[in-house]
Image: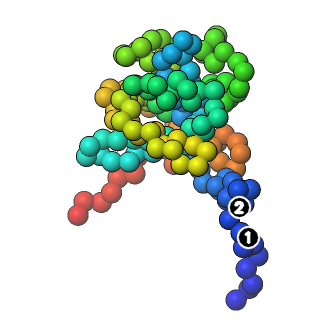
């Protein structure tokens, strides 16, 4: 058997960051009301529980969006479509007005900004914020959902945006048991 070329290293900050680049993540934008409203790109969105329905995302405590998210009763999580790479870059850029043109959005329920033309969005009531290291894990209960009937998600992998191969977007049906 050939010898493995995989390197084993200590799990420090840089090594963990490098390893996590191998994981493909769905790209989302989280928005929260405020004066001004805030929003940021996140790849940490996940489902936590279906009963009761709970989702989560993570946010750096040093982020300019954190103070508004720390106070928000409601947030919106937007799942971006493959064609929305520029929108993802806008909400990942510090020091810019993320809601200025060409961003298209409207004020939704509970005063939360809702981005137009995303693959899906969830309006969520924040139920808890857990500080872990330099981040907060925000736990939220979806109250209103909307999703497109067609479209492919925007993914983030190895430091760049990606999408699904065209033949992988078809629905896979499982055989009847």
The residue at which mark 1 appears reads as: 9
| Mark 1, secondary structure of its residue | loop
Q: Position of residue 150 (x, y in %)?
A: 44, 31
Farthest-out residue, bottom: 1
Q: Nearer the viewer, residue 135 or 92?
A: 135
* Residue depicted at 63% across the width and 32% down the height: 63
Q: Nearer the viewer, residue 36 or 6?
A: 36
| Mark 2, secondary structure of its residue | loop
The residue at which mark 2 appears reads as: 12
Q: Position of residue 137 (x, y in %)?
A: 49, 43
* Residue depicted at 67% across the width and 58% down the height: 16
Specify the color scheme: rainbow
Please give left or right for residue 169 compared with residue 98 in the image.
left
Q: Is residue 170 visible?
A: no
Q: Quadrant of the N terminus?
A: bottom right
Measured in 3D between alpha carbons, the distance from the residue under mark 1 to the one under mark 2, in whole angstroms, is: 8 Å
Using the image, determine if residue 91 lies above or below residue 44: above
Of the two numbered discs 1 and 2 in the rendering, the one whose residue sits closer to the viewer: 2
Answer whether labels 1 and 2 touch (C-beta < 8 Å).
yes
Q: Residues within 10 Å of mark 1 (few under 14, many from 20)?
A: few
- Residue 177 figure quarter: bottom left
Q: Residues within 10 Å of mark 2 (few under 14, many from 20)?
A: few
């Amino acid at each position: 058997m050939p010898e493995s070329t995989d390197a084993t290293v200590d799990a420090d900050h840089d090594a963990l960051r490098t390893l996590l680049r191998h994981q493909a993540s769905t790209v989302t934008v989280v928005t929260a009301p405020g004066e001004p409203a805030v929003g940021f790109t996140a790849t940490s969105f996940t489902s936590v529980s279906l009963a009761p329905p709970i989702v989560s995302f993570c946010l750096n405590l040093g982020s300019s969006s954190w103070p508004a998210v720390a106070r928000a009763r409601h947030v919106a999580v937007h799942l971006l479509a493959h064609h929305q790479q520029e929108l993802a870059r806008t909400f990942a850029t510090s020091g810019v007005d993320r809601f200025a043109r060409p961003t298209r959005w409207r004020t939704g329920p509970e005063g939360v900004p809702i981005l137009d033309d995303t693959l899906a969005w969830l309006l969520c009531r924040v139920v808890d914020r857990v500080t872990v290291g330099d981040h907060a894990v925000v736990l939220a209960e979806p109250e209103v959902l909307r999703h497109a009937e067609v479209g492919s998600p925007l993914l983030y992998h190895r430091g760049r945006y990606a999408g699904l191969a065209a033949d992988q977007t078809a629905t896979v049906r499982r055989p009847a048991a």
